[in-house]
């Protein structure tokens, strides 16, 4: 079968790499990789291709940044001729970014089958652009590959036929499992022994200057007693330009490559984030995670894993941090099927389909 994969933004790469590899190992498929160019900085894109050992994209749509409408429309306009020319039998889209919804919409209109990897996640928060992308992509998809039981339940509740739903586990964890031994060899040189690792890029936190200043104050306060390492996403970098610089034990850096970030995550005393994928990775690693959002589309990271939702409350953040620092942080377990073999399960589902 000719399978075309669409990736565009940083979290897509860790999800697509294991699926590409597993399909390659099956041997009976032709694969095409399209990069939309939603993320284009070397440290947001190229370095992930090399570290994850992904093939170079066959096509790069080079859409770059823009408003949601513009970025989504540009991807659609540039992707449609590629699909018409290459005529894949199946298009796989990943996660919840604008590249995902744009590609799914093009394919649905052209009558080309769409498989959505990481289907069924819901934050039940329509103010998140990613939630809109998730719901619409799932509605358009023919095959829905889910990471966890809650995702299946969400889809069934929304009326998706059960035969379209395939619970395969967490593809992002496949990449983690494969590269954790490599990350273990990354030198600790220059890094503090005990530290909090911070990431921040959600519009609800960084586009609202009041919310962002509050978080910044919490980080500065936290760095009185604990080193804080904060690789800064480009969206956040723009927003903190006026006041955001390293001071004392607060260390800002550029976004990090996958392996270096994984090394930092696995050794962190605590991770503070608003990312979806990092809530999952910390759960797998057993590292306490405090999520600076009011909800999560990944509830198993709370019910089974190490994640605690702290929202935007400085007090709650301080309390939860104190618990962790005193050794009373949440302990967790690894959810079912987060085992490094999700990509293989997707490949075997696709390989059973008539080509
Ligand atoms: C996107 C995803 C988000 C994901 C995140 C991971 C959507 C709606 N959002 O958010 O779900 O968690 O990626 O990073 O798709 N920029 C650069 N260089 C780059 C990429 C972006 O400087 O390589 C800057 C641009 O100024 C851009 C801004 O970052 O305007 C935001 O990028 P964009 O892709 O629009 O959204 P993200 O915030 O990265």
Image (tube, rainbow, N blue to C red):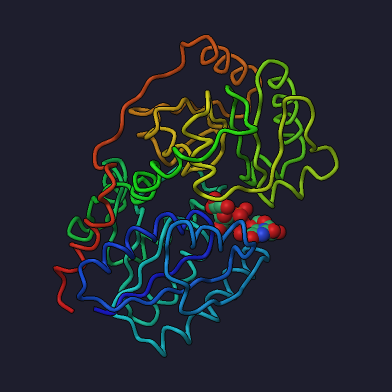
For the C terminus, the quadrant is bottom left
Question: In the visual, does 77 lie left or right of 124?
Answer: right
Relative image position of residue 31 (x, y in whole percent): 33, 76
Q: Position of residue 148 (x, y in %)?
A: 29, 43
Q: Is residue 228 above or below residue 7?
A: above
Q: Looking at the rendering, in which quadrant would you find the N terminus?
A: bottom left
Q: Is residue 301 left or right of residue 212?
A: left
Indicate the position of residue 169 as horizontal and vertical percent values.
28, 47
Residue 15 visible here: yes
Where residue 310 sits: x, y (%)? 55, 25
In the displayed structure, 1 sits above or below 41; it is below
Residue situated in front as seen by the camera: 173 or 154: 173
Q: Residue at x 68, y 47 (%)?
A: 254
Q: Eyeballing the image, is 135 above or below 74?
A: above
Q: Nearer the viewer, residue 34 or 285?
A: 285
Q: Quadrant of ligand 1?
A: bottom right
């Amino acid at each position: 079968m000719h399978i075309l994969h669409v990736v565009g933004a940083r979290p897509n790469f860790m999800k697509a790499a294991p699926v590409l590899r597993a399909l390659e190992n099956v041997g009976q498929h032709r694969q095409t990789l399209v990069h939309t160019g939603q993320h284009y900085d070397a440290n947001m894109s190229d370095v992930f291709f090399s570290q994850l050992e992904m093939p170079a994209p066959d096509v790069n749509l080079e859409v770059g940044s823009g408003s949601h409408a513009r970025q989504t429309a540009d991807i659609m306009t540039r992707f449609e001729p590629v699909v018409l020319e290459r005529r894949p039998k199946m298009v796989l889209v990943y996660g919840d970014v604008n590249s995902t919804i744009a590609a799914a919409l093009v394919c649905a209109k052209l009558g080309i089958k769409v498989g959505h990897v990481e289907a069924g996640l819901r934050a039940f928060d329509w103010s998140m652009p990613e939630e809109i992308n998730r719901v619409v992509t799932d509605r358009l998809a023919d095959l829905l590959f889910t990471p966890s039981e809650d995702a299946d339940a969400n889809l069934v509740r929304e009326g998706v036929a059960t035969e379209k739903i395939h619970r395969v586990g967490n593809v992002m964890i496949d990449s983690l499992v494969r590269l954790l031994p490599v990350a273990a060899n990354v030198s600790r040189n220059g890094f503090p022994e005990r530290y909090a690792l911070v990431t921040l890029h959600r519009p609800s936190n960084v586009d609202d200057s009041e919310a962002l200043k509050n978080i910044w104050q919490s980080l500065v306060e936290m760095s009185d007693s604990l080193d804080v390492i904060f690789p800064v996403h480009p969206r956040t970098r723009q927003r903190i330009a006026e006041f955001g610089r390293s001071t004392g034990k607060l260390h800002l850096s550029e976004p990090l490559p996958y392996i270096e970030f994984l090394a930092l995550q696995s050794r962190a005393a605590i991770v503070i984030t608003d990312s979806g994928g990092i809530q999952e990775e910390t759960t797998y690693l057993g590292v306490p995670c405090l999520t600076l959002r009011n909800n999560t589309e990944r509830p198993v990271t709370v019910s089974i894993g190490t994640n605690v939702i702290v929202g935007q409350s400085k007090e709650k953040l301080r309390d939860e941090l104190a618990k962790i620092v005193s050794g009373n942080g949440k302990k967790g377990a690894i959810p079912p099927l987060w085992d490094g073999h999700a990509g293989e399960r997707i490949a075997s589902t696709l390989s059973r389909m008539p080509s």
